[in-house]
Image (spheres, rainbow, N blue to C red):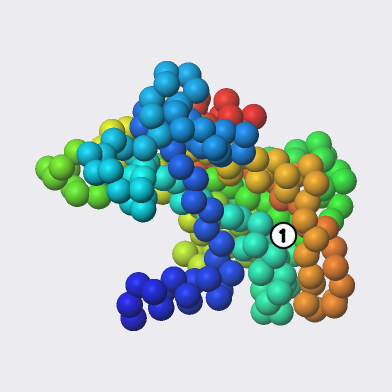
Amino acid sequence: MDYCNTKNLIRDLGLYIKKIDASKTDCMLYWKDDIDLDYFKFCREVRYKPTRERNPTRKNTLYAILRYLLITPRLQRLYASKAIIEQMTWHANHQTDEGFMCHLSAWRHFDWTYPNFAAKPRNVRLYLCTDEFAPHGQYGHTYSCWPITLTLYNLPLGICMSSDYMFLKMVIHGPFNPKHLIVVYLVPLIKELQNLWHVGVLTRDSVKNETFTIRAALMWTVHDLPLMGWVWMEFR
């Protein structure tokens, strides 16, 4: 399958991707109110790479671009599948057997703190996971790669950690480790999660044949210790 056919297949599946221009120094996204800027508003770095050609039809070359996969359409699609809907409310009807490790105390504390959210079992509970790895190996070229994934906690234990329900949201990559500036790339995800928490989105339940408002909560983040301070300061 060639590249064009692959793009058309992904588009027909509804896996929406938002392309967001990023600054050369990883300090800013050209997004929302800053989408039309041609320079970084703090250090005045230019948005596009300089070129010697004077061709007005030539497209400008960006220093960096973020490809962000929206989580909202993915959650809506789960309730469009009759095979998955019953699994999405498994956590509300299942009793954990004695002797099995679980997050029961943390789960109950969340339900006690946010009773309106907990009263609707179709609401979605998520956790975020990220870690850096070197795609070229330990002895290859210096390169930094940070995949950001969201995983559903609504599902039964046997499938909640399967790759089918681990949603890749973005990959932050480049020749250098962004360190604390990784939070700049997380801004679109944070804004979308805030909207899902405070407002929600209308979703169609294919089993009950009704429309309801689905909300989502980010309950945990999983990452190494150095990243904890940077991520926690943004998601708290």
Task: Identify the image quadrant of residue 221.
Answer: top right
Quarter of the picture containing the N terminus is bottom left
Mark 1 residue crowding within 10 angstroms, few (<14) / some (14–19) / many (20+):
some
User: x, y percentage for residue 107?
Assistant: 71, 45
- Residue 124 appears in the picture as rendered: yes
- Residue 146 appears in the picture as rendered: no
Query: Is residue 235 found left or right of 226 in the rendered image?
Result: right
Tell me what residue is drawn at x 71 percent, y 74 percent: 80
Query: Is residue 43 found left or right of 201 in the rendered image?
Result: left
Tell me what residue is drawn at x 58 percent, y 42 percent: 188
Three-letter code for the amino acid on which mark 1 is drawn: His
User: x, y percentage for residue 2?
Assistant: 33, 77
Query: Is residue 210 found left or right of 137 in the rendered image?
Result: right
Q: In this rendered view, identify the residue nearer to me: 222 or 180.
A: 180
Quarter of the picture containing the C terminus is top right
Task: Identify the image quadrant of residue 219.
Answer: top right
Tell me what residue is drawn at x 65 percent, y 46 percent: 192
User: x, y percentage for residue 43?
Assistant: 42, 18
